[in-house]
Image (cartoon, rainbow, N blue to C red):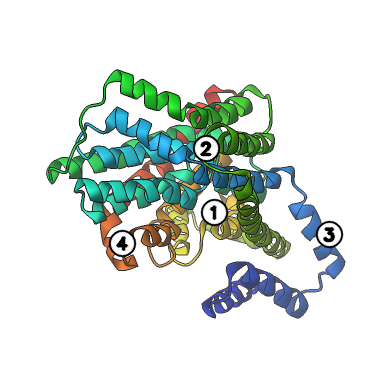
Amino acid sequence: MNAAIIFILLLVLMLTGMPVSISLGLTVLTFLFGFTQVPLESVALKLFTGIEKFEIMAIPFFILAGNFLTHGGVARRMINFASSMVGHWYGGLGLSGVLGCALFAAVSGSSPATVVAIGSILLPAMTKAGFPKSFGAGVITTSGALGILIPPSIVMVMYSVATNTSVGALFMAGVIPGLVLAGVLGGVTFYRARKFNYPRLPKASWAERLRTFKASAWGLLLIVIVMGGIYSGMFTPTEAAAMSAVYAFIVAVFVYKDMGLKDVPRVLLSSANMSAMLLYIITNAVLFSFIMTNENIPQALADWMLGHGLGMVTFLLACNVILLLAGNFMEPSSIVLIFAPILFPVAIKLGIDPVHFGIMMVVNMEVGMCHPPVGLNLYVASGITKMGITELTVAVWPWLLAMLAFLMLVTYYPPLSLWFPRMLGML
């Protein structure tokens, strides 16, 4: 009964158009005052201890690093390198977009940032080269979603905060699925380009490839610093985030010089705005999780599922359906922070590995970012392409169907996520 009251309250508040973070906070306060005897002191204590986690510090640093890289010309150099490598294949610029998004995802941690950075440069170039606008939009909208699967990933940090799973293990678990998904999206791009005989670029010489690699090397080196540093134990994921922010600042301002010192305050302010928004969501989600745990809702759900003989296969399918439906109305951070504390205890009871479950949730978030009505990537791509959401939704379908097939693979084949971190001794 209490579970029904909590979710009805949350749903009603969200349907009024209220932001998810405020809806969460009001739901918790209303339920606390109206239906429980929980002392407010314990709520205040939980609020502070809930957000007093070292991992949360990674979020503003990764956002800052992503903003420096987006404004600092790193994306353009990565696209030039990608074009020199795969541009001569069918749909060359489209494949450059997939490869460029994969490379930028490995330094930014954010899907919308990846769509903006790669899309704003590549989409005009694709239209000029003779590609249909819908083809370019489909490639960039879906490939941009790699931003939260290929580490580092802000959404993985959120999952870690919600479930106390190792951020380092999650980052390493995202590497192989991220590369496989990039291959899948590239395959769809190549197939459609070949089918419709879209333009190809002249084959670049090895001297040209070396030149573009050297030009993009400073940006690519950030991948080595973050991943190498975490794997070698030189620093934690949070320290890696701080390192990447400082490194991105130095590269953008002093190495590439695409950004002047006068632009830095603007980047700092926009990063602070985004960080404050996410931290506010986390704060309210911590309280929501506290209420759920206090009312034993996750445990009751686990007992009900086990009592009715619902096994791992059915539970994972149900999780996918719930998370994809949630993706219709909420953005990834909110979904992870609301649903992870509810579904995670059930997953553990059923013997599902917490890292595998985290990667499955992240892939669900990726799909959610590419379909209406609240697909963040759709809105970002719409702003770049000046296409309507309906038009964009039609454009992304071939890639979206491939992503759904990939989601099934990740869900029911755990070694895809777990092999790499196990090999590194992180599990």
Please name the amino acid that badge 1 sits on: Leu
Labels 2, 4: front one: 2
Q: Residue at x 37, y 37 (%)?
A: 79
Using the image, determine if residue 424 lies above or below residue 195. Answer: above
Q: Is residue 268 visible?
A: yes
Q: Which mark is residue 218?
A: none
Using the image, determine if residue 390 lies above or below residue 251. Answer: below
Alpha carbon of mark 2 to alpha carbon of mark 4: how far? 27 Å
Q: Residue at x 77, y 74 (%)?
A: 36
Residue 189 point in image, percent of width and height: 25, 43
Other residues around mark 4 within 10 Å, as few (<14) / some (14–19) / many (≥20): many
| Kind of element beneath mark 2 | helix
Question: Which one is earlier in the sequence, the residue at label 1 or at label 3?
Answer: 3
Screen quadrant of the C terminus: top right
Please name the amino acid that badge 3 sits on: Leu
Residue 374 point in image, percent of width and height: 44, 65
Q: Which mark is residue 45?
A: 3
Alpha carbon of mark 1 to alpha carbon of mark 3: how far? 33 Å
Labels 1, 2: front one: 2
Viewer-nearest residue: 313 or 252: 252
Q: Which residue is mark 2?
A: 107
Using the image, determine if residue 80 lies above or below residue 192. Answer: above
Q: Which mark is residue 393?
A: 4
